[in-house]
Amino acid sequence: MKKIFVLAALLLLAVSSVCAQSADRLTALIESEKVTYGQVCYFAAMARDMIDEKSSDEAAFRALVSAGYLPKKAEADSAVTLAQVAGVCSMAWDIKKSLFFKISKSPRYAFKQLQALGIISPSADPSSTVTGHQAVNIITACMELAEEEAAR
């Protein structure tokens, strides 16, 4: 339990350095049994300065769809899979992409890349739904990796 609060504090600290979003959004994400596309998109769109902190999950989702980060058939309130979270995070934080991801834009290849980088467990199933804790861990790791790459 202590680890969860430390991770949440790190995410809040990291996100607040990029933007000043509300702690309520982070709390809602952590408490989610099944994270939605909209929730993940909110953090990604904030990182890209595509929305302001008062925007809805739906507005964040629409911003990422119009930017080409998501397929047009996706829905903001649908439960998101590990592969889909990996795809959003890879694009939002410019994570080094594999050749196949660059060519196809398939979230499955982003998932494989995040596995190779140690962000997602090698035994994880790309089609499994994501809990709030998993999403926080992935988003935090992607943000930290992006900061490291930017510092080089």
Image: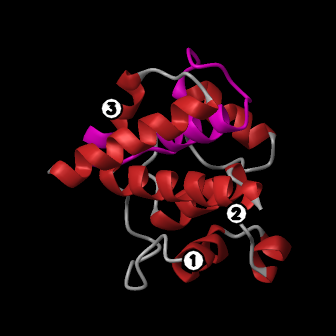
Using the numbered discs, state the Cα–Cα distance from disc 2 to disc 3 in whole angstroms. 25 Å
Residue 70 visible in the displayed image: no
Query: To which residue does mark 1 refer?
Result: 117
**Is 53 included in the stretch rendered in magenta?**
yes
Query: To which residue does mark 2 refer?
Result: 95
- Label 1: how many Cα within 10 Å (few below 14, some 14–19, many 20+): some
**Is 50 included in the stretch rendered in magenta?**
yes
What range of the chain is rendered magenta? 30-57
Residue nearest the observer in this picture, 46 or 5: 5
How was this image coloured? secondary structure
Residue 97, picture quadrant: bottom right
- Label 2: how many Cα within 10 Å (few below 14, some 14–19, many 20+): many
Residue with the most extreme right position: 103
Residue nearest the observer in this picture, 49 or 73: 49
Q: What is the three-letter code of the residue carrying label 1?
A: Leu
Using the numbered discs, state the Cα–Cα distance from disc 1 to disc 3 in whole angstroms. 27 Å
Tag 3, which secondary structure?
helix
Residue nearest the observer in this picture, 56 or 117: 117
| Image marks 1 and 2: residues in contact by CB distance under 8 Å | yes
Q: Taking 61 as reference, is 64 left or right?
A: right
- Label 3: how many Cα within 10 Å (few below 14, some 14–19, many 20+): few
**Residue 79 higher or lower than 145, as above or below:** above
Residue 136 visible in the displayed image: yes
* Residue 96, percent from left and from top: 74, 69
